[in-house]
Amino acid sequence: DSGVTQTPKHLITATGQRVTLRCSPRSGDLSVYWYQQSLDQGLQFLIQYYNGEERAKGNILERFSAQQFPDLHSELNLSSLELGDSALYFCASSGTGQQTRGYGYTFGSGTRLTVV
Amino acid sequence: GIQVEQSPPDLILQEGANSTLRCNFSDSVNNLQWFHQNPWGQLINLFYIPSGTKQNGRLSATTVATERYSLLYISSSQTTDSGVYFCAVWGYSSASKIIFGSGTRLSIRP
């Protein structure tokens, strides 16, 4: 157990639908990051939150949004889903901003989203 | 932004062989990690190694920050070592994020 919890592990949904992926960071970590990994592709950075505020944005589609709550858990909302959104979605957490607390990023086990 | 290149892209070895995976990065980095993505998709943190050398069992890693490269050594390979190995770095910017290389796909044959 890495300490980063992602739910659900698997999700199958139809095109046009909306889903929410949830992430609880490692205890004490204030930063949460979301990554997308399509089949046989590398990891693409989507968005970062730090202590409830958006810190950095990557290649995130307008149909996607995220937020980080006061208890530091984060949710990634994917709407108007398309077949091409099928992917592994990872959440990672790290220490206070640039301070990685000596262990860097810790990744959750991912949510495998299949859009049919 | 920082560019990360990993080599080789693919590696096929017999069980028991040793291997060296390389990661080159284009600019000074604040931190560097090696990850193993197993066939089930899980990303496992192997080393947090912004500089120096670390060892963990059959695996070791060396980062030479001044020359902008890192090496991951796997000795006495086992079939469970199969998967994709990613190098990831991030820079000094306050808005910096981790940048992944494209990975080395390692296949260990019994």
Image: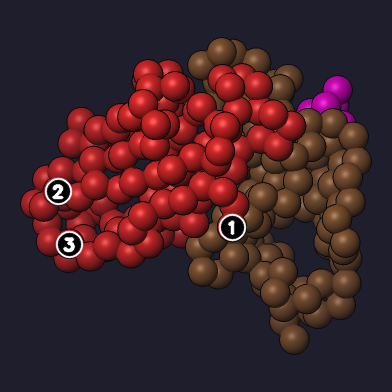
Q: Identity of the amino acid at label 2?
A: Arg
Whichever of labels 2 and 1 marks the residue nearer the N terminus, that label is 1
Return the residue at label 3.
A13
Subunit of mark 3?
Answer: A
Mark 3 or mark 2: name the one nearer the start of the chain. Answer: 3
> Around disc 2, counting alpha carbons within 10 Å, would you say few (fewer than 14), some (14 to 19), or many (20 or more)?
some
Q: Distance between the residues labelled 2 and 1?
A: 28 Å
**Position of A33 relative to B54 (above/below):** above
| Residue positioned 29% across, 33% down in the render | A66
The tally of labels here is 3
Please state the extent of the stretch shown in magenta in the rendering: B64-68
Q: How far apart are marks 3 and 1 (CA)?
A: 27 Å
Q: According to the colouring, which chain is brown? A: B
Marks 3 and 2, how far apart in space? 8 Å
Residue corresponding to mark 1: A1
Q: Does any portion of residue B100 appear in the rendered image? A: no
Report whether B41 appears left or right of B33. left
Mark 3 neighbour density, 10 Å: few (under 14) some (14–19) many (20 or more): some
Q: Which of marks 3 and 1 is nearer the N terminus?
A: 1
Q: Assess whether residue B11 is covered by the magenta stretch.
A: no
> In terms of secondary structure, what is the magenta stretch mainly?
helix
Residue B50 visible in this rendered orientation of the protein: yes
Q: What element carries label 2?
A: loop
Q: In which quarter of the image is the C terminus of chain A?
A: bottom left
Residue appearing at x 72%, y 78% in the figure:
B79
Quadrant in which residue A98 is drawn: top right
> Picture coordinates of residue B44 (x, y %)?
63, 55
Rendering colour (chain A): red
Q: Which residue is drawn at 57% across and 32% down?
A: A28
Residue kind at label 1, given as amino acid type: Asp
